């Protein structure tokens, strides 16, 4: 039981990394979610991370999860396809989940060269978004897996969403762009 409490405490501490970020890595300054939504998303993320770590300790280091408005985005690498299915199932079993996007890759499907190229693509796109004054780069998580670019985040309006996708297409046209960009007005609690 002490191990569970230690793991939960460790997960809590790792979420308190910066005064400008809260939980999911989206900056509070630009985050249109209410504090309540941010807390709910952080709890979902920490709950999933703890469950993954309890299922297999290596998942704590190899699987990343982001949560926005109950939508879970998974990334990382696993050894076997069955592990990917197991992790996806665990994400769907998280209380309050609305959707799950899975960008987890199976290790045998990528090599050092493709991983290095993916990291380069991600950093180039991140830089392009930072220097584009029409986008709030902090509101987006970028993940490139085998030249496929996954974008996960919140756009303030339709123009920003279009600008983020256009920036990615201008910067990189060799792979597939898979956006999961939600408009601030589409968030569940903004409809109440």
Image (cartoon, grey):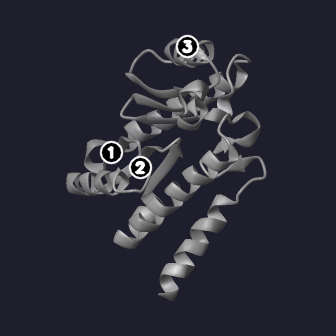
Q: Secondary structure at mark 2?
A: strand
Label 3 – label 1 distance at C-alpha = 27 Å
Residue beneath disc 1: 105
Say whether disc 2 or disc 3 marks the residue closer to the N-terminus.
2
Q: Residues within 10 Å of mark 2 (few under 14, many from 20)?
A: some
Q: Residues within 10 Å of mark 3 (few under 14, many from 20)?
A: few
Q: Secondary structure at mark 3?
A: helix
Residue positioned most to the bottom: 2
The residue located at (58%, 14%) in the rendering is 158
- Using residue 136 as the reference point, say whether residue 108 is left or right of it: left
* Residue 67 x, y percent position in the rendering: 51, 46
* Residue 35 x, y percent position in the rendering: 69, 47
Residue beneath disc 3: 162
On the question of residue 124 being in view, the answer is: no
Label 2 – label 3 distance at C-alpha = 27 Å
The residue located at (55%, 58%) in the rendering is 43
Q: How many marks?
A: 3
Label 1 – label 2 distance at C-alpha = 6 Å
Label pair 1/2, CB-CB below 8 angstroms: yes
Label pair 2/3, CB-CB below 8 angstroms: no
Q: Please tell me which residue lies in front, 77 or 165.
A: 165
* Residue 27 x, y percent position in the rendering: 70, 41
The residue located at (56%, 30%) in the rendering is 191
Q: Please tell me which residue lies in front, 98 or 65.
A: 98
Q: Residues within 10 Å of mark 1 (few under 14, many from 20)?
A: some
* Residue 165 x, y percent position in the rendering: 52, 17
Q: Quadrant of residue 16?
A: bottom right
Image position of 37 with respect to 144: above or below: below
Q: Which mark is residue 76?
A: 2
């Amino acid at each position: 039981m002490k191990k569970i409490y230690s793991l939960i405490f460790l997960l809590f501490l790792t979420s308190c990394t910066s005064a400008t970020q809260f939980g999911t890595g989206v900056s509070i300054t630009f985050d249109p979610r209410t504090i309540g939504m941010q807390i709910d998303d952080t709890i979902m993320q920490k709950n999933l991370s703890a469950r993954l770590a309890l299922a297999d300790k290596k998942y704590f280091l190899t699987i990343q999860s982001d949560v926005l408005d109950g939508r879970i985005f998974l990334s990382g690498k696993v050894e076997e396809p069955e592990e990917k299915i197991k992790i996806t199932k665990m994400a769907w079993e998280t209380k309050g989940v609305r959707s799950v996007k899975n960008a987890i890759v199976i290790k045998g499907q990528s090599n050092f060269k493709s991983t290095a190229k993916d990291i380069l693509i991600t950093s180039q796109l991140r830089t392009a978004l930072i220097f584009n004054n029409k986008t709030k780069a902090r509101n987006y998580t970028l993940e490139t897996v085998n030249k496929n670019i996954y974008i996960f985040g919140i756009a303030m309006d339709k123009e920003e969403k279009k600008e983020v996708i256009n920036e990615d297409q201008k910067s990189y046209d060799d792979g597939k762009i898979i956006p999961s960009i939600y408009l601030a007005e589409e968030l569940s609690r903004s409809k109440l």
